[in-house]
């Protein structure tokens, strides 16, 4: 059926008016919480463009990121392998915080097949714009070595902690900005500065990286409007440090902030931390608006599927106050946690003529599903993955469900099977205790019901064993490296 809807590229060129292979735009926010968009219940932060996309498409209520932190989540997204099978399972640093330290995280191996490589074989122009985090300069993990024709942004996650950096990367070349001036993205003050202008003079510069990346994304769409194209727009927003253009901050009330953030939880101080955080998300929303406007201007909006999600839940540091914004609603946990607040994320899909406007889905899905879904959307052969295509859910077909979803991170391990969620929250000193939650009746994961359902716990334990393949690079504490016997 899909082949009938999306004929081969050669046939399209010969047949005027024939259905075209769809363009794909995937927007990945960074640390955007489940309830930080208006369409997900947020009442303080303005997100008109993403709310519009939800009205024009489908909003998912049970979508999960690949991990509760950046790099492994992106690895799951791009390769379709969950963290029990993925190469990258945690953040890994190639250097420190100094200006001249090596850039990059653990490089994605050449053997891995990404969504970009899959679509490149289908004839797509491919671009990654934003934050990468899967390999630094001159490594096999560089996006140009992973199927992306074009890259612009931060190769290194540490560098992305500063929104006014000394440089970004355009493919293999440094793009020097802000006159090449470097300053640390982690500072602390003993007392507040005298004025807001004093903070701006110390921490603001002329070139705001997200604005440059937005312009690059718009240019890529303009240059490739004859399609097909794949744009992976991995914005660093709203990951701290708290930095936003002053005009965006001024959109939010001054009476929100009665105390300055002095950097005691890491990252940069700010005189109006709540307003700055809201302003960052609204700036991200405006970036998405610019992308949508360009799709319209080029006449390709109706032939483009747009997906928006986040790499994990809201952060707990850098001056961000999740409670003030009710960032995860009733969900337990934040970034770095395998409780729901760390991995359940917003997900919106718009595809005119295929996805019914204003719909909501409670289909249980995750990042590993994106690759097979895009493969189905584009009539492309996908490599083997842990994912299940959710194209039928988008188009009103009969949707296959996951038997199990799996995560591991640091000292944590979790699975979801239907209504049941099992989590080992502290794999330490041989502790393999599983907490059990019934998400249908306890979305906030407050009542551990493992004692009442031992047979369910046994099923989840077996699933954890089956889904985990040991990793020498990222060993799972206690599971891959059991504690020594007493007296040994």
Image: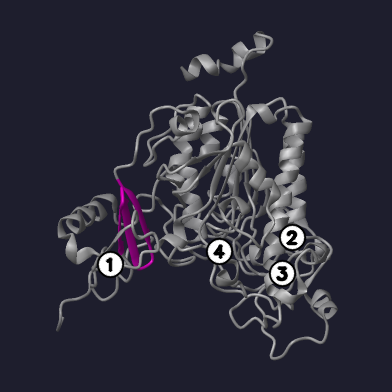
Q: Which residue is mark 3?
A: 275
Residue at image position (35%, 60%) is 442
Q: Pick the residue in front: 50 or 168.
A: 50
Q: Label 3, secondary structure: give it.
A: helix
Q: Label 1, secondary structure: give it.
A: loop
Q: Is 488 displayed left or right of 344 in the figure? A: left
Query: Whole-percent x and y of residue 61?
Result: 47, 48
Q: Which span of residues is magenta-colored? A: 404-423
Q: Is 456 displayed left or right of 88 in the figure? A: left
Verify CB contact (< 8 Å) between mark 1 and mark 2: no
Q: What is the CA distance from the residue labelled 4 to the residue labelled 1?
A: 23 Å
Query: Whole-percent x and y of residue 34?
Result: 52, 57
Verify CB contact (< 8 Å) between mark 2 and mark 4: no
Query: Counting residues from the N terminus, which is met first, the one under dot 4 or under dot 1?
Result: 4
Numbered circle sitting on residue 462: none
- Characterize the magenta stretch by its predominant secondary structure: strand
Query: Whole-percent x and y of residue 323?
Result: 55, 71
Query: Whole-percent x and y of residue 468?
Result: 29, 53
Q: What is the CA distance from the residue labelled 3 to the residue labelled 2?
A: 27 Å
Q: What is the CA distance from the residue labelled 1 to the residue labelled 3?
A: 37 Å
Q: Which residue is mark 2?
A: 167
In the image, which is nearer the foreground, mark 2 or mark 4?
4
Q: Label 4, secondary structure: give it.
A: loop
Numbered circle sitting on residue 327: 4
């Amino acid at each position: 059926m899909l082949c009938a809807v999306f004929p081969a590229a050669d046939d399209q060129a010969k047949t005027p008016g024939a259905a075209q292979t769809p363009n794909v735009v995937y927007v990945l926010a960074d640390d955007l919480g489940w309830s930080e968009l208006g369409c997900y219940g947020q009442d303080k932060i303005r997100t008109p463009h993403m709310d519009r996309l939800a009205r024009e498409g489908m909003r998912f209520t049970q979508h999960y990121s690949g991990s509760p932190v950046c790099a492994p989540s992106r690895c799951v997204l791009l390769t379709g392998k969950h963290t029990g099978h993925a190469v990258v399972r945690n953040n890994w640093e190639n250097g420190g915080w100094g200006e001249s330290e090596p850039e990059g995280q653990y490089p994605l191996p050449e053997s891995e097949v990404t969504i970009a490589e899959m679509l490149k074989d289908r004839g797509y122009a491919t671009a990654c714009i934003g934050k990468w985090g899967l390999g630094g300069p001159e490594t096999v993990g560089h996006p140009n070595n992973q199927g992306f024709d074009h890259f612009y942004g931060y190769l290194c996650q540490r560098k992305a902690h500063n929104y006014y950096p000394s440089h970004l990367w355009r493919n293999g070349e440094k793009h020097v900005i802000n006159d090449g001036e470097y300053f640390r993205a982690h500072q602390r003050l003993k007392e507040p500065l005298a004025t807001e202008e004093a903070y701006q003079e110390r921490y603001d510069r002329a070139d705001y990286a997200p604005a440059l990346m937005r312009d690059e994304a718009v240019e890529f769409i303009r240059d490739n409007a004859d399609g097909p194209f794949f744009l992976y727009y991995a914005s660093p927003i709203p990951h701290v440090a708290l930095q936003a253009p002053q005009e965006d901050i001024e959109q939010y009330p001054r009476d929100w902030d009665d105390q300055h953030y002095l950097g005691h939880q890491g990252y940069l101080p700010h005189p109006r931390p709540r307003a700055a955080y809201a302003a960052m998300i609204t700036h991200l929303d405006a970036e998405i608006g610019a992308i949508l406007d360009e799709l319209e201007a080029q006449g390709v909006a109706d032939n483009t599927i747009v997906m928006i999600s986040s790499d994990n839940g809201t952060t707990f540091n850098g001056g961000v106050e999740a409670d003030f914004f009710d960032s995860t609603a009733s969900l337990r946990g934040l970034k770095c946690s395998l409780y729901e607040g760390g991995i359940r994320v917003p997900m919106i899909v718009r595809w005119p003529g295929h996805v019914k406007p204003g719909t909501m889905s409670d289909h249980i899905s995750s990042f590993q599903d994106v690759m097979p879904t895009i493969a189905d959307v584009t009539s492309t052969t996908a490599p083997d993955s842990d994912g299940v295509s959710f194209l039928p859910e988008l188009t009103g077909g009969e949707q296959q469900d996951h038997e199990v979803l799996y995560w591991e991170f640091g000292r944590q391990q979790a699975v979801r099977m239907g209504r049941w969620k099992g989590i080992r929250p502290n794999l330490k000193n041989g502790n393999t205790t599983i907490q059990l939650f019934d998400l249908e009746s306890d979305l906030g994961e407050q009542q551990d019901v493992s004692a009442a359902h031992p047979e369910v716990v046994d099923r989840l334990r077996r699933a954890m064993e089956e889904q985990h393949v040991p990793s020498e690079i990222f060993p799972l504490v206690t599971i891959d490296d059991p504690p020594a016997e007493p007296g040994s």
